[in-house]
Amino acid sequence: MVLRAPAKVNLCLAVGPRRPDGYHPILSLAVAVDLEDRVEIQPAPALEVVCDDPAVPAGGANLAHRAAALLAQAAGREPRVRITIEKRIPVEAGLAGGSADAAAVLVGLSRWWGLDWGDEELARLGLRLGADVPFCLRGGAALMEGVGEQLTPLGDLPRLALVLASPRGARLSTAWAYQELDRARRQPGDLEAARGRIDGALAAWRRGDRAALGAKLFNDLEPVAYRALPELAPLAARMAREGALGVVVSGSGPTLVGLAAGGEAARTLSGTLATAGYRAAAVETLPGDRGSPRLTPDRNS
């Protein structure tokens, strides 16, 4: 069984004050994109997860491993499977790569074991693994609230051409970024004020006004990423000079998301940045029916 696991980007992200349980309430305009990991599930004597990227943790520190073990426990099964992950989503890049892989494992194993579990049951289980997993299970475009588990699907939106770019080798820990945000900012984030900004961005997206949408991208974690990695500022400036209609940090970073006028513009910008030594990819947003983990028809697809 082979599945594709799409990355997630945040076009807008507001972060509220830290809760007593350590989590932060958020409000985010998020969308799946066609940068995808490949996740293969095969029978094996015992649970094993292997990955072609040495930066991906092994064992219980790996979200895909934890997803298989958690679903097996909940279903009363023995997780006798080998999970092979071919990484295309960079690690610790603000693109929910680990959560995407975990979501793919939950979807794949629920089918492998013939479980008659609905989306809500898998989402509740996924939330125990990470706040992005419920979104990665659903995909498409959505407004994320709570800690990320409250999702309002957003349908009938024009597809966007984006460029994902970062300095090669750059990584940022999500946990560290939130801690640094708490330490550095003087006032907690105002989620209600942010809601109006996101409504404006969504209205621009719906009417296909990419220039207006580009001007409304924001992320409360962006200053943290820029302080941690000073090389992000010149990269963002270059993306804007080269035609990006808006540039924003995705998640906790370090990936920058550049909104392009169209697919050709995105490919041109991505090529220019790659030639300059950056890690860059031209991607498109995915509709709901393709923006969640999905089975592929053959092993080499």
Image (cartoon, rainbow, N blue to C red):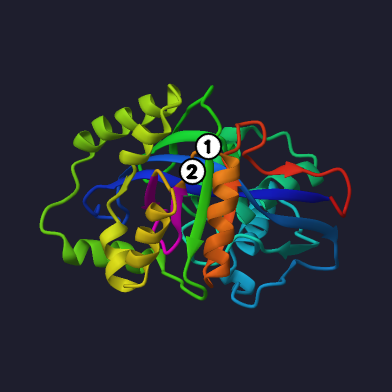
Tell me if residue 125 can be seen: no
Kindly identify the amino acid type of the residue bearing the numbered disc 1.
Answer: Leu
Which residue is nearer to you in this view: 239 or 70?
Answer: 239
Question: Which residue was labeled with disc 2?
Answer: 260
What residue is at 80 percent from the left and 56 percent from the top? 41
| Quadrant in the rendering for residue 139 | top right
Residue 161 vs 179, above or below: the answer is above
Q: Position of residue 77 (x, y in %)?
A: 75, 53
Could you tell me residue 61's position as x and y percent? 56, 71
Q: Is 300 on the left or on the right of 254, as rendered?
A: right
Mark 1 and mark 2 lie on one chain; the one further toward the N terminus is 1
Q: Pointer 1: what residue?
A: 160
Report the amino acid beneath label 2.
Ala
Q: Position of residue 289 (x, y in %)?
A: 66, 31
- Secondary structure beneath dot 1 equals loop
Residue depicted at x 41% and y 69%: 173
As helix, strand or loop, the secondary structure at mark 2 comes to: loop
**Residue at the location (46% across, 71% down)?**
171
Q: Are marks 1 and 2 in contact (CB under 8 Å)?
A: yes
Residue extending furthest left? Answer: 186
Q: Is residue 250 magenta?
A: yes
Position in image of residue 196 (x %, y %): 24, 30
The alpha-carbon separation of the residues under discs 1 and 2 comes to 8 Å
Position of residue 253 in the picture relative to residue 288 (left or right) = left
Q: Is residue 301 above or below residue 115?
A: below
Please report the bounds of the magenta region as a residue range: 246-258
Q: Nearer the viewer, mark 1 or mark 2?
A: 2
Quarter holding residue 59: bottom right
| Mark 2 nearby-residue class (10 Å; few <14, some 14–19, many ≥20) | many
